[in-house]
Image (tube, helix red, strand yellow):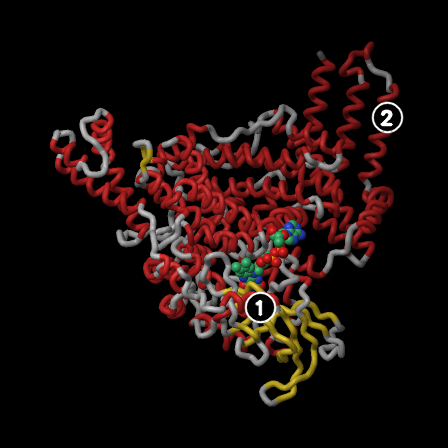
Amino acid sequence: MAELVFLIVCVAGAFLLAMRRAPLWGWTVALAATLVVWQSELLWGEAGALEPGFFGVIGWLLVAALALLSVPAIRRATLVAPLFKTVKGILPKVSATEQAALDAGTMGFDAELFSGTPDWDKLRAVPPITLTTEEQAFIDGPTNELCRLVNDWTIRFNNREVPAEIWDFVKRNGFLGMLISKEHGGLGFSPQAQSIILGRIASRSPDVCTLVMVPNSLGPGELIEKYGTPEQKDHYLPRLAQGLEVPCFGLTGPTSGSDAATMRDVGYVTKGWHEGQEVIGFRASWEKRYITLAPQATLVGLAVRLIDTQNLLGRGEDLGITVALIPANHPGVEIGRRHLPGGSAFPNGPIWGRDVFIPIEWVIGGEKMVGQGWRMLMECLAAGRSISLPSSAAAGAKSLLRNTSAYARVRKQFDLPIGKMEGLEEPLARMIENAYVNEAARGVTASMVSRGEKPSVISAIMKYQTTERMRRSLNDAMDLHGGRGVCDGPTNYLQAAYQAMPVAITVEGANILTRSLITFAQGALRSHPYLYKEVQACQDIDEERGLAAFDRAFSGHMAFTMSNLFGALFHNLTFGYFGHVPEKAYGTAEWYRQLWRSSRNFAFVADVSVAVLGGGLKTRQKVTGRLADALSELYLLSCVLKRYEDDGKPANDRHIVELAARNGLFRFQEALRGSVDNFPSTPVRWLMRAVVYPLGLHYKPAPDRLGHICVGLVLTPGEVRDRLTRYVYVSQDPKDPTGLLELAFTKAVAAEGAEKKLDRAVRSGQVRRVHGTDWIGDAAKLGILSDDEARLLREVESLTARVIAVDHFDPAEVRPNYMTPGHNARAMQSAAE
Ligand SMILES: Cc1cc2nc3c(=O)[nH]c(=O)nc-3n(C[C@H](O)[C@H](O)[C@H](O)COP(=O)(O)OP(=O)(O)OC[C@H]3O[C@@H](n4cnc5c(N)ncnc54)[C@H](O)[C@@H]3O)c2cc1C
C-alpha cells in the first residue's frame, strides 16, 4: 500500500512540476527528495529500508547531472553551447523579405493559443463591436442608399462595368477615403466601421464592394497615410478621399504571383529630366497583371526592385523592393486594357511600362524609403487582411443564409417547404454555423485591429477561413436553390457572389498558400513563446550575447515542452474537466474547458513538430496545413464564445453556439489527428498519439437534433434570424428580388395554418390543385378556409410564383454588348503577343 501511495505521489509531483514549468533546480530538488524518501526508514520501516542498489545509483547520478546543469555557466559550456553551434549551422539564413514578413504585425490571441494555457481575460478584454454616432449614421444613410441604388444585373451583365452614377455617389460621399484620416480630408473611420460598411455593400454587389474596398485596403491611400512624405500626404490624401484620384496597386506580374517578392520588374537608378530639371530617379520596366481598378485608375502604386549600379544613392547596388506613386497618364505607362475576372464587372487589368523615368521623389516616403517596399506591404497586410476579405466573406455567409432560409421556407416540393426536409436541414445547419462563426470572428478581429493591433497570424487565419466558409455556404445555397440558383438573370441573387467567389479565394494570398505555408509557419515563429527568440539568438552577430539569449530561450523552451507534454496528457486523461474556465462563464463553461484542453494538445503537437521538423517544416505542407486548420478552429471557437458573451448570451443563440462548438472541436480533432497520423517520424508519432489520444478520440460532430433546432430558428422570422444576419443589407422593396423574397417568406409563415388546412383538403380529395381549377376558391366555398385565409393564401401563391420564377431571354438579348465584332480575334492576338 505504501508503495502505491509513494508511486502516486511521485507521478502527481512530476505532473505538477512539469505543468508549472518548474526550473531545472526544481526538478533536481524534487528528484533528490524522492530518492531520500525512497531509501529512508520513514517510508518502509527500519527493516525494509532499501539499499541504494543499481537504480539508486542511477538516480543519484541524475540528481548530480541536473544539479550541475542548473548552474548557468556549466549548462552553457556543456550543453547549450554545442547545441547553439549545431542549430546555427543548420538554420537557414532568414532572407530580408522573410524577415520583413516575420517582423510585420503584432502577436494577438494566437500567442495565447500557442501557449497551451490561454488567458481568457485577454480575449474578454477585446472591446465589443462599437461604432461612433457618425459611423452609424453613415451606415444608415449613404451606405444604405448606395445599396438601394445598385442594380447587380445591369452592372454584371448589361454594362459589364460599374455605372458612372455609382462611381459618382461613392466618390461624393467619401467612400473611397474611409481609412484616410479626417486631418487629410478622409472619413477616418475605425476598421470595425469600415468592415461593417464593406460587408453591407458586399451583401448587395461584390463589384461595387470592390470599388470601395480596394482604395481602402493595401494601396496608395494606406501607404501614403502611413509612410508618405508630408508633401505626398498634403497633395494626394485629400484628392484620394474625395475621389479626385482613383488608385490602384500593382504588385503581381506573370512570373511573380504568390511569390511576389521575386519580381523581375526593375528600376535602374539614374539621372533624368523631370519638370525641366535634372534629378535622380530610376528607369523602370515592368509587367503587372490582375490589377484591380487599373483600367480606370489615375494613380498607380507600383512595386519594383531598385538597382543602383552607379551607387548614386550611396547605399550599394541591390536596394530592394520599392513602391512609387505614378500618375496613370505619365509618359510610358500603358494602362487601360481589361481582364475579365469570372463574371465580375469591376475594373481589373494589366499595366506595362518600359524604360519609364520616375523621379525619386515619387517613391512613397521619399528617398529614405527606397528599398522598404516589402516591409511596408507586409506591415499593412498584417492588419488589412483582417478587414477587407473577411468583411465580405462574413457578409456573404450572412446574406446567403438570409435569402436561402427564406427560399427554403417559401419553396415547396412534396407538399413540404424544402427547408423542412432532413436532407436540406444539413446544408442549412452548416450555413447557420458559417454565418455565426464568420461574423463572430469578423467582429472580434475588427475590434482587435480597431484598438491598434496588427495581428499577422490571425489575419492569415481570417483570410483563408472566412472565404473558405463563404465558399461552402455558396455551394450549399446553390444546392438548396436547385435550378433557380443556376439560371442567371436579373432576379438571381446568388450568381454575383458565385462568380466572384474565386476572386476572394485568390487575392491577398491565395488560400492554399495562406493555409499551408503562411499561417502555421509564421504562427510557429511569431506566436510560439520561445522559438522566435531562439532563431533571433542564432542570428545575433555577437556570439556571446547570442549564446546567452539562446540559453534563456532554450531553458524556457524545455520547461514549456515538458509542461505541454504532461499538461496535454493530464487534461486528456481527465477529459478536460480541470481546464481553466473564466469567471461567469454560465452556459459556456464546458466549451472553455475543452478549448483549454485542445489548446494544450495543439501546443504540444505544434511544439514537437517544430522541434523535429525544423527548417523542413516549409516543405511539409500537409502537416503545417492541418496544424493551421487546428489553430484556426481554436481561434474561431474563442471568437464564438466572445461574441455570445458580447451579445448578452441570448437564450436561443446557445443552440447555435453549441452547434459551432461541437463541430469546431470535432474539426480541430480531425485536423490534429491528420497531422499526428501522418507525422514523418514513427517514434514521435507514437509519442504524440500516446499523449493526445490516451483514451482514444474524444469529440463527435454536433448531433442531428441540434441542427434541427437551429434550422427551425431560421425558418421563422424573428430575432435569431435577424441577429444571425446582422449588418447585411435587407431590402424591403417587393420590386427587388431579395425584397420580394423577404415579403413572400413573412407571408408564407403567416399563412402556415391556412396552408395546412388546404393541404389536408387536397390530400383527402375535397379540392383539386391542378392548372385550370381555383383550389383556394373551392376550399373557401366548402368552408375549409375563411375569406381572410383565402385572401392570404392567394397572396402567398402569387408571391411564391414570382419568387420561384426563373428569368428567360430572347436570344438577341443575351449577346454580351461589350463584345464588338473582331473582339475575340484581337483579344487572342494580344494574349499571344
Ligand atoms: C481578380 C483579381 C484581382 C487582383 N488584384 C490585384 C491587385 O490589385 N494588385 C496586385 O498586385 N495583385 C492583384 N491580384 C493578384 C493576386 O494577388 C494573385 O493572383 C495571387 O497572389 C496569386 O498569384 P497567381 O494568381 O499568380 O497564382 P500562383 O502564384 O501561380 O498560385 C497558384 C496556386 O499555387 C498555390 N501556391 C503557390 N505557391 C505556393 C506555396 N509555396 N505553397 C503552397 N501553395 C502555393 C497558390 O495558393 C495557388 O493555389 C489579383 C488577382 C485577381 C485574380
Q: Where is residue 428 in the image (x, y as percent from the top left)?
A: 41, 38
Q: In what quadrant does ligand 1 lie?
A: bottom right
The quadrant in which the C terminus is found is: bottom right
Q: Is residue 138 visible?
A: no
Residue that mark 2 sits on: 58
Q: Is residue 44 visible?
A: yes
Q: Is residue 653 left or right of residue 41?
A: left
Which labelled disc corresponds to residue 140? none
Q: Position of residue 474 (x, y in %)?
A: 45, 46
Contact? badges 1 and 2 (CB < 8 Å): no
Residue that mark 1 sits on: 829
Neighbour tally class for label 1: few under 14, some 14-19, many 20 plus, Cα within 10 Å: few
The quadrant in which the N terminus is found is: top right
Q: Where is residue 732 in the image (x, y as percent from the top left)?
A: 28, 51
Counting residues from the N terminus, which is met first, the one under dot 1 or under dot 2?
Answer: 2
Q: Is residue 536 left or right of residue 591?
A: right
